[in-house]
Amino acid sequence: MTGDQSVFGRDERRGVNLAVQEWNQNGGVLGNKIEVIIEDDQHDPRQSVAIANRLASDGVAGVIGHFNSNCSIPASAVYNRAGIPMISHGSTNPQLTERGFNNVFRVCGRDDQQGKVAADFACSTLKASRIAIIQDKTTYGQGLADEFRRQLGENCKVVYYGTIIQGDKDFRAVLTNVKAKKPDLIYYGGVYPEGGLLVKQARQLGIKAVFMSGDGILGPEFITIAGSAANGIYATFGPDINNVKTAKDFIEIYEKRYGEPGPYSIYSYVAANILLDAIKDSGTTNSGQVIHYLHTHIFTTAIGTIQFDSKGDVIHSPYVVWQVKNGQFVQL
Amino acid sequence: MRIFIQQVVNGLTTGSVYALIALGYTMVYGIIELINFAHGDIYMVGAYGGLIALTLLGTVRSALHLSGIGMLITGITAGMLLSAAYGFTVEKFAYKPLRQSARLSLLITALGVSIFLQNYVMIGQGASDKTYVSLRVLNSNFIVDGVAMTANQIIIFTVAMAIMLALDLFVNKTMTGRAMKAASQDSVAAQLVGININTVISLTFIIGSGLAGIAGVLVGFYYGIVNFSIGYLVGIKAFTAAVLGGIGDIRGAMVGGLVLGLLESLGAAYISSDYKDAFAFIILILLLLIKPSGLFGSRHS
């Protein structure tokens, strides 16, 4: 789990490992111990396809992941051909489940839902009227930014729409153009390494606009990178698991073993549990039957009950608005 | 106009960094005609050198009553020394044994060193981003007539200019500097007049790498984060700057770096930010078509 988003990778690995250890302590599944194969796609679509092919030829019973939408989407085609069930814990781009693949599931929400929540919040609650949108040209970042733009009300005008390059560290050129348009809200579609620098450099350039983004910036790393500039920024994500009763056991065990869970730790834990539940209850690792079971049953998980619709999306949109207060993300 | 000036400020800052790194490329090329592709990673090592020194220092800072400037200078010195040590070692172990071999072997070795350094730092320091301490002196912000500048930007620009001036004086006025120049013009003749070519080559690597280390620490402070892969793109851009100025020419590298930074910033602002990284290379291709030896290119390159 390398690359500049490696913290997300570490969190998801821990979540899956925790789930599998618990299952193995209780005798595994169908009388066998569960083995986890960890692969690293480095948020590179080419790597993700290579890995998908390798896992397919290894004959894995199911896949948890991938994380980035631009990796999940091409990889899902490979798993579809091989008939392997795939449950993504963090890919929110709508396209993932829109291509009629019956083996593809996700336990997180979708960016059209997320974009709507963000757009409503920006227009109705914050009453922003001049909006600048910046995205990182990835499947996730662009998809989210465009969904946000599509859902904006009539009173919200997009005064700037621009892009940055993932992996870049200097966004002052774009931000100087943004500043000239005098927006009162900047919406960013992208992930934390660039997001943190973006907000920091925006403040250094004297831009005072409210900053808002999606689930890709959530987590303490964003705040470490942005420093004091992080305070007051908004982001959309699922509800705070500290307020979810069913997540209590998970948090306790995770903290004991690894420290504080990252934003996606519990989602990968839940995804692994759902897959193993489906294998156990359908009594086979035959992928056709497991996939059928996933589509037709309701799962009780650490983040509440989960039911997949015919596309493989969760039925209830989980998004709420968070804000950074005193150097911490808190749910509003 | 305000936007234009702001973009010039942004561009000069990144341009100064490119120039500092480009100097290493151009000096090494001048002497052994090697495009040292590991140079970008030497810059990255310098950034980590500063990071480690500052982290260690951070624990005892209050006891030593160290000011922000003190931290800055210590960080830069540590980064410079570490990079210089790595540059020296890399030359001794990886390039020197191959000095008589085909040029291509040396080039491929440089690529190998680059991959080695990246993975070595990744294993030693972890794959995730590391955060630099935020010094108040560097983050103080000036907004003059709508144009924003941080103390950090001013320091990067001034330090880079001062170093380049010093280097120019060193190469042209001192005995050692002239020996370096002589070796780059004709290494055989230089040896005949009693110049120790090994010393000169080592010195070139030490100076070039030290400058990259300084750039690494300055950038670490500027963006606040470093990771093991930061050297790759910056290295290629600095290489472009060196070619733009005419590889082998020290003043050319300085001008090339600044021009590249400005072009990138203005191109991203007025044409399209989608192609920010491409502008550098488009300009390079155009220039090479018109003047293949670069802006200040010497006759024999």
Image: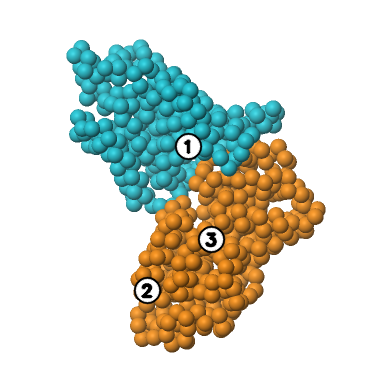
Chain colours: A orange, B cyan
Disc 2 versus disc 3: distance between alpha carbons? 23 Å
**In the rendering, at what x and y percent does residue A88 appear?**
51, 68
Q: Residue at x 50, y 46 (%)?
A: A167
Q: What residue type is labelled 2?
A: Gly
Q: In which quarter of the image is the C terminus of chain B?
A: top left
Residue B195: tell me if it is visible: no
Give residue B276's mark: none
For badge 1, the amino acid type reads Val
The quadrant holding residue B140 is top right
CB contact under 8 Å: marks 2 and 3 = no
Q: Name the residue under label 3.
A: A69
Mark 2 — residue? A59
The answer to whether residue A53 is visible is yes
Tell me the element at label 1: helix
Q: Residue B219 carries which label?
A: 1
Mark 2 Cα shell of 10 Å, populated few (<14), some (14-19), many (≥20): few
Residue at horizontal 61 percent and vertical 77 percent from the top: A309
The residue depicted at 61 percent of the width and 39 percent of the height is B272
As rendered, which of A180 and A235 lies closer to the eye? A180
